[in-house]
Image (tube, helix red, strand yellow):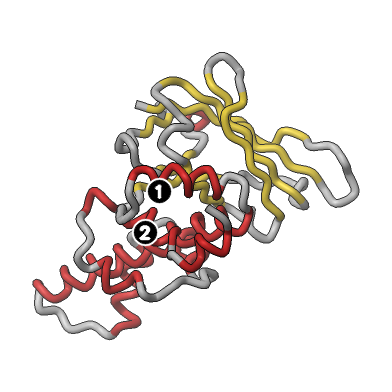
Amino acid sequence: MDHEGSVKSQAVERYLLGDMPAASQEDFAAHFFSCTECAEDLKMTSLFLDVTRTVIKEDKIVGQASVKKSPLSRWRSARYAIAASVACLSFMLYQNLVVIPRLKTAAAPQAVEVFPITNAESRGGAQTAISPVAGKPYLLLVDIPPHDERYRIRFVISNAAGVEVFADEVPDKIAQNTVPFLISPWILIRGEYSLQILGRSEEKDSFTTVARYSFHVN
């Protein structure tokens, strides 16, 4: 699968809505790992789907309670129900609006799950644990603590043996407070992982560690 074919066949939307055959899913997954544009489309569209589902759910609740609210009021209620960063990023999507009608009839298991990764242990909390649905992609929302090295931010996930299994790098315009990452279901198997956040300033060539989180995949 090439980029032109992916766009024409609406591969991103079909992949996230569960409409793509298993064989095509493997071809598309192999493609978006090597195609920056498709990988970014997948990340942004996932955020859009998550926010849209929240809005639809909020509309149903309002209708059942016979509470009359303006569209702006309903949107504000939905926005507070999710991470503020996800809502803000969703406005930046160049989404294909054809997926909205299909969302109203999409089954709940098809929704893209979202798991926040925070430094809970440093605040006396338990280690973060996530339980993704087998065979389904999901989003990790990574908290970025305040720091000075904001020109480029690098994220590295390693397994318990110290082997790097995922890495990505984003510019400062994206890495403000929380950054979403779409994770393919076969990348993180059950076990312990560490997430290292590294940053560098525009004047430096090397990265320095900004934060390190640990989490468990069930």
Image vertical order of residue 117 relative to residue 43, above or below? above
**Residue 15's mark?**
none
Percent from the top left, x then y, of residue 194?
55, 26
Farthest residue toward the right? 203
Between 98 and 127, the one nearer to me in the picture:
98
Pick the quarter of the image with the C terminus.
Answer: top left
Q: Residue at x 10, y 73 (%)?
A: 65
Find out whether the residues at labels 2 and 1 contact each other: C-beta distance under 8 Å. Answer: yes
Q: Residues within 10 Å of mark 2 (few under 14, many from 20)?
A: some
Query: Residue 147 lies in what quarter of the image?
Result: top right
Percent from the top left, x then y, of residue 69?
23, 82
- Visible in this render: residue 159? yes
User: Mark 1 belongs to which amino acid?
Assistant: Ser
- Visible in this render: residue 124? no
Q: Residue at x 40, y 48 (%)?
A: 24
User: Mark 2 belongs to which amino acid?
Assistant: Arg
Query: Residue 132 lies in what quarter of the image?
Result: top left
Between 6 and 49, the one nearer to me in the picture:
6
Q: Residues within 10 Å of mark 1 (few under 14, many from 20)?
A: some
Judging from the image, what secondary structure is the residue with disc 2 in? Answer: helix
Judging from the image, what secondary structure is the residue with disc 1 in? Answer: helix
Q: Residue at x 48, y 49 (%)?
A: 28
Image vertical order of residue 36 relative to residue 62, above or below? above
Between 192 and 136, the one nearer to me in the picture:
136
Between 187 and 81, the one nearer to me in the picture:
187
Query: Residue 167 lies in what quarter of the image?
Result: top right
Image vertical order of residue 147 relative to residue 11, above or below? above
Please give the residue where the numbered disc 1 appears in the rendered image.
24
Q: Is residue 210 left or right of residue 115?
A: right
Please give the residue where the numbered disc 2 appears in the rendered image.
14
Q: Earlier in the sequence, mark 2 or mark 1?
A: 2
